[in-house]
Image (cartoon, grey):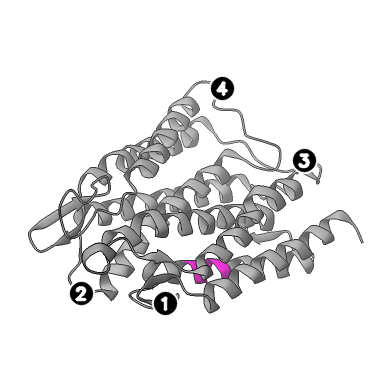
Amino acid sequence: MNHNRLLAYAHLLMAGGYLVFTLVGPWAKRGESYGVFSSDGGTGFGIIGFILAIILVIMAVMRLAGRSEVVRGLGVEQLTLIVGVAAWLNLICFIVGWLPIFEHGVGRRRGVPGTGWGVVGAYFTVSQIPLLLSPLTLGIPSPSKGIKSLSDSKRHAFSATTIICGVGLIAFPYLAWVTSGSIELSAFDGRNGNPTSGPRFGYLLFAIGVTLVISGLMRLRPKGLAEPGPNLLLSHCLLGAAVVALTMPLGIIISCLQRSGLDIGVGTWLTLASCLVLVGLVISENRTRNAVGV
């Protein structure tokens, strides 16, 4: 049995464990334990986590079946890394961003809801995919052939759009992300005496936005920007950043639709739009370059 097949089985084991923990274990403790789909449990972030778990299992099965390409311009290995990072950070965003929005309990027992063991188990299984398995499998094959270079006009267009999306991810978290009655909270706001808190995604989105702006500006140079590796192109990295950023507004939107008393702010919708534009952009670039990678 070769290394690729062993790593594919390890990928299936980790993805299967992530799916089981996501579905079976509790996501939040508010006096009682609540599961992945409950409005008091995983809510929107649980639904996203479940979808990403299914994708990771499908990717593992495709690897075992010998498939190397998901769609034109996107390989199994690259999508596994992208979805693995998104699933991992989706759990962190749930813990840091969503759970603290509402306090639970009364008196001395009042505080942020606790994290269920389902989230803890899912975190430790899914984190092994982007941190360990994907870098190993991306590094084993020889550099792929047939990847096309972008023309200067397309490179400039892709770069300019990347910069615009990056500026959006920097600016839109400062707008209202959630509203509760007369209270409007951005993605940077804490509780500050209010009964609700902002989702606290602003710093991560700000970092992603700055990275996008820098990469877009560097690609505008005459020689462009060097690719991260022979089997991992810049467009794959940008797709990863877009999917990670997309989980935050999408999780908030689904969660707010499930829960009464909390409305969706304009900043959430604008951030979602920026992420969708960026996803469409990098998918188009991958198809143009036939950037399978492995």
Query: Which dot, 2 or 4, sits closer to the camera?
Result: 2
Decide whether the magenta segment is chiefly helix, strand or loop.
Answer: helix
Q: Secondary structure at mark 2?
A: loop
Q: Amino acid at mark 2?
A: Ser
Sequence order check, earlier mark of 2 and 4: 4
Residue 74 in view of the camera: no
What is the number of the mark on residue 143?
3
Residue 86 in view of the camera: yes
Q: Which residue is mark 4?
A: 223
The relative height of residue 91 versus residue 260 in the rendered view (above or below) is above
Query: Which dot, 3 or 1, sits closer to the camera?
Result: 1
Residue interval drawn in magenta: 49-53
Does the magenta segment cover residue 209? no
The quadrant of the rendering that contains the N terminus is bottom right
Q: Which residue is mark 2?
A: 260
Q: Residues within 10 Å of mark 4 (few under 14, many from 20)?
A: few
Sequence order check, earlier mark of 1 and 4: 1
